[in-house]
Image (cartoon, helix red, strand yellow):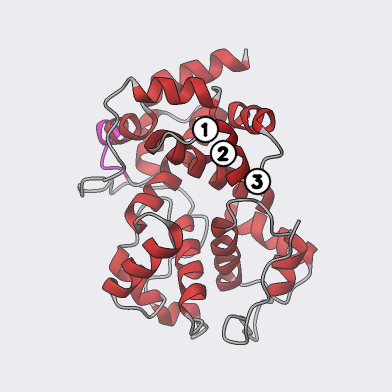
Amino acid sequence: MRTSPALTEHERIADSGDPVNDSRVLIAMGLLSTDLSGEFAMADIAASLEVSKSCFFKAFRQQVGETPHRWRLRQRIASAQSDLLESRITLLEVARKYGFTDQAHFARTFRRIVGDTPSSWRAGMWCTPAGRYAEQPEERCQGDRGASTLKRHSSHTSLGGSVPSDQRSRVALALGLLAADRSGDLSIDEVAASVQMSKANFFHAFREQVGRTPHQWRLEQRIAAAQSDLANNSMSLSEIACHYGFSDQAHFTRTFRRVVGETPNSWRVRMQGHAS
């Protein structure tokens, strides 16, 4: 396991308040989002943020709702799903790309999270007219979306003036903001402003570093989080739709089917069948 790259002075967040504040957790989420091979040691990420590993784990879990390991694993599987859907890359190549020891390890992990084997999931997706991840702008649910995982950062001033100066770190911070914005509340203009970049420069830098647009990447995270709720609790489809910022259950169902290849209800029933 390699260590995370040492942050420059511009990348370090040296706020005088809480040593593991929102900005640091967002930076960590961005670093974990770009570490799709799972090679960065958590201790090194904590050290990069100049906090102890135990403080980092506690703050991350309090603000995000799960451990850094679990959160990163879900990002890796979501990205693997994108590769399986959009290319003819082999399962072994996908396993290696995302840091699994071998194809069997990847298949076991994928099935535990998705509820299906990678090959079966891919075959099912290729048999459906699943569109890409381009979500049509629609009026979002105005009801209660539940507790947000992190405070909304609608401008760079809400980050306490702690925005790093180099482009790589700004994209990492943006990844954290987008990952935390599971309801799709923040506009991309606001995210770009939060990291003090023009919208055009932000789009270019994001796509260059992440391989997809900010809209596509955030939608993938929202659907992956919705899948977790579908599999692990009894929330209704309308509650999940509202929680993740879709205008209504029908909007959520259409988007879920485009991305996953089946309706949320069908997917949930299949997951419950695997668990029984």
Judging by the rendered image, the residue that carries numbered circle 2 is 93
Using the rendered image of the protein, determine whether residue 233 is visible from the camera's viewpoint: no
Q: Residue 99 carries which label?
A: 3
Q: Which residue is drawn at 21% across and 46% down?
A: 136
Q: Which of marks 2 and 3 is nearer the N terminus?
A: 2
Residue type pointed to by label 3: Gly
Assess whether mark 1 and mark 2 are in contact (beta carbons under 8 angstroms).
yes
Please state which amino acid type lies under the numbered disc 1.
Answer: Thr
| Nearer to the camera, 116 or 272 | 116
x then y, percent, for residue 176: 50, 62
In the image, 263: left or right of 71? Answer: left
User: What residue does disc 1 label?
Assistant: 90
Q: Marks 1 and 3: which is nearer the front?
A: 1
Query: The disc labelled 2 sits on which kind of residue?
Result: Glu
Q: Who's the residue at 45% across and 40% down the image?
A: 83
Image-based side of 251 in relation to 63, left or right: left
Q: What element carries label 2?
A: helix
